[in-house]
Image: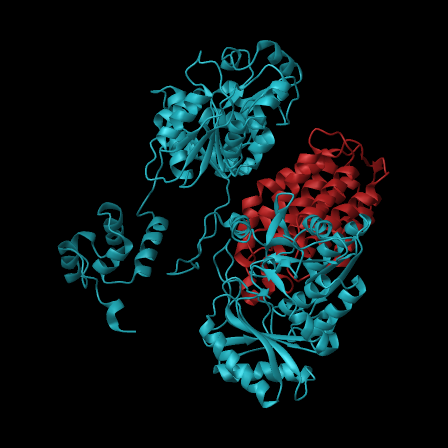
Chain colours: A red, B cyan
């Protein structure tokens, strides 16, 4: 059975932060079309603060996710801070104390993150939010493992579904959040939260996949 | 409107002759208006307005001709490859390190020494970045000196240049004194020195020097610096730092052994940008790294391949937010930080979808950097209202009332996103709120500043949180409340829900908090100031919330500073009754009606819920959403007063103006507080804040 080691995998969170910081301008730009235009700046600030605290430390993935979640939760504000904050702290909790992470643990982690978000936010699939990325990604991962696929192929399925989910927001009309006021005008534009969520899930899963043994 | 705008402007002779032929395209352009427009724009250097007159078309058409000509390939704008590369590297450095700005001089131009070219580039940066009234700290070094030699900035007023460190031996020609003097001359600034050695014999001597009034005055000037210009020294063996005489070689060896890779303003940093401790720290007279990092604009000028590790360390440490370097060094920094696919990444940059050009897509605003609007506003607020509020631990995101909190008094903490000014910070002061937590535009503050507010407001009798009922605010304030409780501060919360249009009466607890906040804060502040218990303060605040009724009407949307676009649309003849202060949906969207009809619709809604009978007293707030002028607010007030008078309801007090805005939204809200004796007493309780004073 494929697993990856929790120890020293904290570096995955650093590369996660790098991807978010790289995409700062892009995320703000798409957010600017139907939102405030500050998603990239706020995300880069939060992930950058967390990366500063993690750099040079050899820590477990669960510790690194906990640091990231705590920073987002306590220092960013708005709705995205608490939403992503709760997702990452839930991720961390499910991995805590697990030396070798297998597909079943990874699935528990994903579900805990999703449930955390749903416990404080009200969005459903189709509302043009990060949920449109997260829900199909989790489903795809579970579907792949249920059909007997190994961990690495399930991770590939997760990434593909996350990106497809992100792209699905292009043709959705926003129903919650600030963009909901734009109605039809929100058509044809990616949701910034769904886009950042796809970046996060992809980097996390690629990091896990590269460490599988 | 008269026909004035459509008649051709009377310009010079050449332009009026062009206007004469406006109905026909001159022969030489064929029948292609694109070529004609491009010729006038790029070759004749006419403005788009002048071209519109000459061609007899609108400016919007000229604008679209010029844009399409680029797409059709009629006009090709090309950049010299070396310049393009340096622009690319600058853009990548800016993005990768989150810099405010970056200037990279091309590497191919070897006609002049690098130090000169960096000096010219640094001079250009000063020209662009230094403004009248600035205090510019200046460190020392060959590159900094070169900037001084090349800079010549005119027309600045009241600028000050201050030395960032003490002085050194004059054995070299770029001492701190000479660098500061040179830059001061170049920008016509007053020059303040640090009249002590940069490094003294002992920590005791340093302390004695720092106690001298003259040095205290000089350090006070340094502490005011809003910009700093500095070089970055490498610690490689061939670096001038070893021979400059600034540091003793014995100490240098210690710092090297401890992992130092560079020097910023006389302080040592390791490869991650962390300070490296050593014996010189307590003997150095000059700016500290912490002080440096607090300066708004931090301009580093440095180049040369040996400086890559030092520059990278300084960038990682956040000491730099404006970088001036050369292309080879810039490329080296990016490579060293793991950006290996620079060239491919730039060529694969996603092309932005072309939006059709139209005459007006953006709202005009007074802006510098759109990402800094909140910080710049808060800087202004803190300066303007220093009599009432002050930052907590230096942070503008948590402000405490001067002479507000006191032992034995329940503390009142309010807060929320910005864009609603004077909500919320205008209501902080004696007799009203004790502290305010400030978020980004239309976005809740995170828990940290809220906790700081709770701590600052606490007088040992508990703290009351009062804020609008929004998902983001609830999440963040609830977390803050938990943290505050862990610190031993008792917290109670009242969510304001005065917007009666936001949800039906059965769901009163789900309603939003809007301009009626003003009344609820006032009552809560008075209760706290009178020394009531936390229970009593909470109870009366809840009562005020239950007896405050607000309905808003929007006529035009607001626009966000980052995008300068409307954040939703309202049709040209429409209005929306019940709209929230972030543009949340209201009850109805309908054709705009006369002011009295609108007021009647609002008052009918309020009377449906407010069980006031003849002889009852109320307070009235007519609030502008931002762009609606007082003239119209008084028209609304007039009708409100008529409707209340007809029911024999007495207006105890009224407020008319900007009390809870929504950026530049056109619209207004009407709030009524249904008073009883207790609320009336508390309403008249004295308070002293920036936007509400009652004696």
- Where is residue B321? Give x, y as percent: 52, 35
Q: Who's the residue at 77% across and 64% down the image?
A: B532
Residue B1 position (above or below residue B449)? below
Q: At which x and y percent is residue A120?
A: 75, 58
Question: Does A111 appear above or below B629?
Answer: above
The quadrant holding residue B362 is: bottom left
Frontmost residue, B123 versus A129: B123
Q: Is residue B386 above or below residue B135?
A: below
Tell me where residue B267 appears, x and y as whole percent.
Answer: 58, 23
Residue A124 seen in the current view? no
Taking the image as shown, residue B302 lies to the left or right of residue A103, namely left
**Residue B366 seen by the camera:** yes
Q: Name the residue rendered at 46%, 36% in the picture.
A: B135
Q: Quadrant of residue B64?
A: bottom left
Residue drawn at x 68%, y 53% as measured from the top left: A133
Task: Compare residues B613 and A166 and report the one nearer the observer.
Answer: B613
Q: Is residue B187 left or right of residue B137?
A: left
Q: Quadrant of the C terminus of chain A?
A: top right
Q: Nearer the viewer, residue B189 or A209?
A: B189
Horizontal placement of B122 versus A61: left or right? left
Q: Closer to the camera, B142 or B314?
A: B142
In the image, B507: left or right of B2?
A: right
Counting every numbered tag in the picture gives: 0
Q: Where's the N terminus of chain A, which quadrant?
A: top right
Q: Position of residue B87 (x, y in %)?
A: 43, 35
Q: Quadrant of residue B615?
A: bottom right
């Amino acid at each position: 059975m494929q697993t990856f080691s929790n120890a020293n995998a904290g570096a995955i969170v650093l590369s996660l932060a790098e991807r978010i910081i790289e995409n700062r301008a892009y995320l703000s730009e798409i957010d600017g079309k139907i939102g405030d235009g500050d998603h990239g700046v706020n995300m880069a600030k939060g992930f950058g603060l967390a990366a500063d605290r993690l750099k040079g430390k050899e820590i477990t993935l669960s510790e690194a996710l906990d640091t990231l979640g705590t920073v987002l939760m306590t220092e960013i504000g708005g709705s995205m801070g608490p939403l992503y904050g709760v997702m990452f702290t839930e991720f961390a909790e499910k991995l805590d104390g697990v030396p070798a992470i297998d597909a079943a643990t990874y699935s528990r982690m994903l579900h805990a993150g999703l449930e955390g978000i749903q416990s404080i936010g009200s969005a459903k699939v189709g509302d043009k939010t990060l949920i449109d990325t997260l829900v199909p990604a989790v489903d795809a991962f579970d579907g792949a493992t249920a059909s007997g696929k190994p961990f690495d192929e399930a991770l590939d399925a997760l990434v593909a579904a996350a990106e497809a989910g992100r792209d699905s927001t292009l043709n959705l009309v926003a129903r919650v959040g600030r963009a909901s006021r734009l109605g039809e005008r929100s058509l044809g534009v990616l949701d910034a939260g769904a886009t950042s969520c796809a970046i996060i899930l992809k980097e996390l899963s690629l990091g896990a996949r590269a460490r599988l043994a | 409107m008269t026909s004035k705008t459509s008649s051709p402007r009377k310009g010079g002779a050449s332009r009026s002759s062009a206007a004469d032929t406006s109905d026909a395209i001159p022969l030489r352009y064929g029948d292609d208006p694109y070529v004609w427009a491009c010729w006038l724009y790029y070759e004749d250097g006419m403005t788009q307005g002048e071209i519109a007159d000459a061609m007899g078309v609108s400016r919007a058409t000229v604008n679209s001709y010029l844009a399409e000509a680029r797409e059709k390939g009629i006009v090709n704008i090309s950049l010299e490859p070396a310049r393009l590369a340096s622009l690319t590297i600058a853009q990548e450095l800016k993005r990768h390190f989150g810099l405010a700005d970056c200037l990279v001089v091309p590497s191919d131009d070897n006609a002049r020494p690098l130090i000169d070219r960096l000096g010219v580039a640094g001079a250009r940066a000063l020209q662009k970045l230094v403004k009248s009234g600035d205090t510019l700290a200046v460190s020392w070094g060959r590159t900094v000196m070169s900037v001084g030699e090349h800079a010549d900035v005119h027309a600045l007023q009241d600028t000050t240049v201050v030395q960032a460190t003490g002085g050194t031996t004059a054995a070299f020609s770029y001492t701190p004194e000479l660098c500061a003097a040179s830059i001061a001359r170049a920008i016509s600034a007053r020059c303040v020195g640090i009249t002590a050695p940069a490094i003294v014999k002992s920590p005791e001597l340093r302390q004695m020097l720092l106690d001298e009034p003259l040095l205290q005055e000089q350090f006070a000037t340094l502490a005011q610096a809003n910009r700093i210009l500095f070089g970055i020294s490498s610690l490689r063996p061939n670096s001038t730092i070893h021979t400059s005489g600034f540091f003793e070689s014995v100490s240098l060896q210690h710092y090297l052994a401890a992992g130092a890779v560079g020097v910023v303003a006389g302080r040592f940093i390791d490869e991650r940008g962390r300070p490296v401790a050593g014996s010189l720290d307590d003997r150095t007279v000059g700016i500290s790294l912490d002080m440096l990092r607090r300066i708004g604009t931090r301009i580093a000028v440095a180049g040369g391949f040996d400086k890559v590790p030092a520059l990278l360390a300084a960038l990682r440490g956040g000491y730099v937010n404006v970088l001036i370097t050369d292309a080879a060094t810039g490329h080296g920094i990016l490579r060293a930080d793991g950006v290996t696919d620079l060239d491919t990444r730039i060529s694969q940059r996603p092309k932005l979808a072309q939006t059709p050009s139209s005459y007006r897509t953006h709202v005009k605003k007074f802006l510098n950097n759109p990402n800094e609007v909140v910080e710049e506003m808060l800087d202004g607020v803190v300066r303007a209202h220093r009599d009432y509020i002050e930052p907590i631990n230096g942070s503008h995101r948590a402000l405490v009332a001067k002479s507000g909190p006191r032992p034995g008094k329940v503390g009142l903490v309010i807060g929320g996103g910005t864009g609603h000014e004077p909500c919320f910070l205008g209501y902080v002061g004696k007799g009203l709120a004790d502290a305010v937590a400030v978020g980004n535009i239309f976005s809740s503050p995170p828990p940290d500043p809220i906790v700081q507010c709770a701590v600052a407001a606490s007088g040992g009798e508990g703290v009351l949180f009062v804020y609008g009922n929004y998902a983001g605010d609830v999440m963040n304030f609830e977390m803050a409340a938990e943290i505050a409780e862990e610190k031993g501060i008792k917290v109670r919360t009242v969510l304001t829900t005065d917007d009666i249009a936001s949800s039906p009466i059965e769901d009163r607890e789900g309603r939003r908090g809007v301009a009626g906040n003003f009344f609820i804060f006032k009552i809560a502040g008075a209760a706290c100031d009178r020394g009531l218990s936390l229970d009593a303060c909470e109870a009366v605040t809840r009562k005020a919330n239950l007896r405050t009724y607000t309905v808003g009407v929007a006529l035009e949307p607001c626009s966000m500073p980052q995008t300068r676009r409307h954040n939703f649309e309202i049709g040209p003849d429409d209005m929306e009754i019940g709209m929230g202060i972030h543009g949340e949906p209201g009850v109805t969207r309908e054709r705009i009606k006369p002011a009295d009809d609108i007021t009647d619709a609002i008052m009918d809604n309020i009377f449906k819920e407010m069980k006031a009978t003849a002889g009852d007293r109320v307070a009235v707030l007519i609030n502008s959403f931002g762009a609606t002028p007082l003239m119209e607010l008084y028209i609304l007030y007039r009708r409100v007063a008529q409707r209340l008078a007809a029911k024999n309801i007495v207006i105890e007090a009224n407020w008319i103006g900007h009390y809870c805005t929504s950026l530049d939204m056109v619209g207004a809200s009407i709030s009524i507080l249904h008073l009883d004796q207790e609320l009336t007493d508390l309403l008249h309780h004295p308070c002293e804040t920036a936007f509400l004073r009652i004696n």
